[in-house]
Amino acid sequence: MIARRFSHPTAAPALGLLLSLALSLAACAGPRTLPGTEALADDGDFAVLSYTDFPDVPEFGDATIYYPVGTPGPIGGVAIAPGFTERQRHIEWWGPRLASHGYAVVLLDTNDPREQPNARAQALLAAVRLLRSESSRAESRLFGRIAVDRMAVMGHSMGGGGALRVAAEHGDIVRAAIPFTPWEPEADLSRISVPTLIIAGEEDDIAEVGEHAWRHFIAIPGSTAKVYMELEGGDHFIADTSRGDDLPTIGRYALAWLKLHLDGDERYRDFLFAAERAGGDAGKVSRYVANP
């Protein structure tokens, strides 16, 4: 094909005027709008499939991998652990939701539902390694599809305590952590350099915020990107599949955290850290403290 250049005595000034007008309109429009902030409260654009036929992992029991169909490039991975006496079904909402937005997600059962946070940390770490290995296993549905350097951990209650421990001890392996109403009384969190979003319930009477979530947030160094988000009137089960009071709100912030810290999409930074976020989200958030 031959590229043709057209010349017309009046075309150049007209085109120049149109270009100038377009640039002026763009300048008046202000900063580029944040993509999909509201849509983050809904399922994403990708269809979701799941599977369980992967090699056994001794650090945890049954598990399910959810993954998106038709993503244009390698995808990040998220490992999620349930809380004390809980199973996958208690966190099942998160698998399809995160996968629909472009992540491979493994939900796990612990070997013993009464395991403490340190064992759950080992389970989460093994789940991250599973996701990474799936990218090189020829029989895997995720063969060649995982960005092995873009991993995050999440968890509820003691699973959230496990996520905090992974962040503190394995910052070279994960890039983000999101503990929900975390229960962890002992771990040294002063070593956390991994961006960490802590989501708490104002009226949690199991992992009371002053003894757990808020104390965890304070313990994380000020040099680390971190956010403390507390739902007004929320209890210990705000992130639970069947009992969560406002999963879309929680999911929106969790997804924005992953978009920023796993995908490197800077367009989500202001949503998470802008000063106007403090003071709540449409009356649903009682406390929001951000340290970019």
Image (cartoon, rainbow, N blue to C red):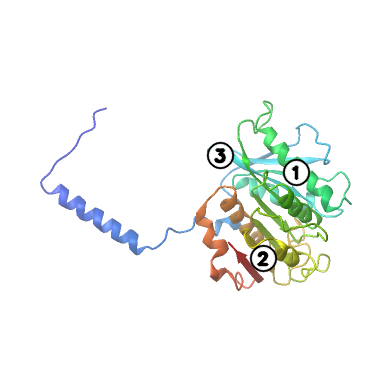
Using residue 99 as the reference point, say whether residue 110 is left or right of it: right
Percent position of residue 199, x then y: 70, 62
Percent position of residue 139, x then y: 69, 26
Quadrant housing residue 248: bottom right
Name the mark nearer the viewer: 3 or 1.
1
Using residue 43 as the reference point, say whether residue 58 is left or right of it: right
Label ID, residue 67: none
When the figure is inspected, residue 242 is found, relative to residue 146, above or below; the finding is below
SS assignment at label 1: helix
Q: CA distance from mark 2 to mark 3?
A: 30 Å
- Residue under circle 2? 229
Name the mark nearer the viewer: 2 or 3.
2
Q: Quadrant of the C terminus?
A: bottom right
Percent position of residue 158, x then y: 81, 55
Q: CA distance from mark 2 to mark 1?
A: 25 Å
- Circle 2 Cα neighbour tier, 10 Å, few/some/many (<14 / 14–19 / ≥20): many
Q: Earlier in the sequence, mark 2 or mark 1?
A: 1
- Residue under circle 1? 125
- Residue under circle 3? 71
